Amino acid sequence: MRKALLLSAVLLASAAVGAWRMTQAGAEPNAAPERADLAEGETLYQGSCASCHGADLEGQPDWRSPGPDGALPAPPHDETGHTWHHPDSVLFEYTKLGGKAALAAQGIDFASGMPGFGDQLTDAQIRNILAYIKSTWPDRLRRSQAERSAAEAQREGK
């Protein structure tokens, strides 16, 4: 009886440690990282995103200051930008719907130059692009972003 109880406790602790290590390694529960195709994500990024966000994810100059139309220039997706501050769901919706539509769904009126790609890219392709972008970040930023995603998923009951 004691051995069975001890074995159960050890197995439970091992499972908890494994789950914790996955989150620390940047696991993305909503993006199915084990199925992410980083090569496809990079190719799609170069074809669909790089013209605005830069071939090296560097963004447009002066990206924090609105242009004459009131829209902000495309931000960098590397570690110098703010992409890693957002959970997966926000990044996905912004990419799929476009900036203005994604924010309007939250009741926010914002001049965004980000077009929606939902009619050009599948959900899996969008996830692959986002996985590629995240793969370029330092470990500490991937962990931080993964923690935000996990916390939001927990709040949403996912």
Image (tube, rainbow, N blue to C red):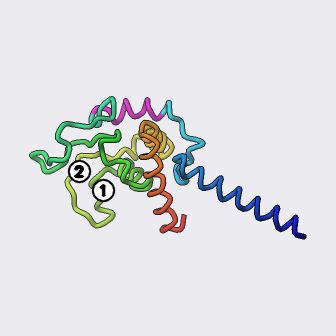
Camera-nearest residue between 60 and 48: 60
**Residue at left offset 43%, top offset 56%:** 89
The crowding category of the residue bearing disc 1, from other C-alpha atoms within 10 Å (few below 14, some 14 to 19, many at least 20), is many
Q: Is residue 96 left or right of residue 115?
A: right
Q: Horizontal and vertical percent for residue 113?
A: 23, 46
The crowding category of the residue bearing disc 2, from other C-alpha atoms within 10 Å (few below 14, some 14 to 19, many at least 20), is some
- Local secondary structure at mark 1: helix
Tell me the distance, in whole angstroms, between the alpha carbons under discs 1 and 2: 9 Å
Q: Is residue 119 left or right of residue 108?
A: right
Q: Horizontal and vertical percent for residue 72?
A: 19, 47
Camera-nearest residue between 125 and 58: 58
Camera-nearest residue between 85 and 66: 85
Q: Horizontal and vertical percent for residue 107?
A: 28, 67
Residue 46 lies in the magenta stretch: yes
Q: Furthest residue to the right?
A: 1
Quadrant assignment for the N terminus? bottom right
**Residue at left offset 87%, top offset 65%:** 4
Amino acid type assigned to the residue bearing label 1 in the image: Ala
- Local secondary structure at mark 2: loop
**Residue at left offset 34%, top offset 39%:** 78
The answer to which quarter of the image holds residue 19 is bottom right
Residue 50 lies in the magenta stretch: yes
- Say the numbered circle drawn on residue 134: none
Residue marked by disc 1: 101
**Residue at left offset 39%, top offset 34%:** 45
Q: Is residue 13 left or right of residue 107?
A: right
Residue marked by disc 2: 112
Amino acid type assigned to the residue bearing label 2 in the image: Ser
Residue range corresponding to the magenta coloring: 41-51
Q: Main secondary structure of the magenta part?
A: helix
Q: Is residue 50 left or right of residue 43?
A: left
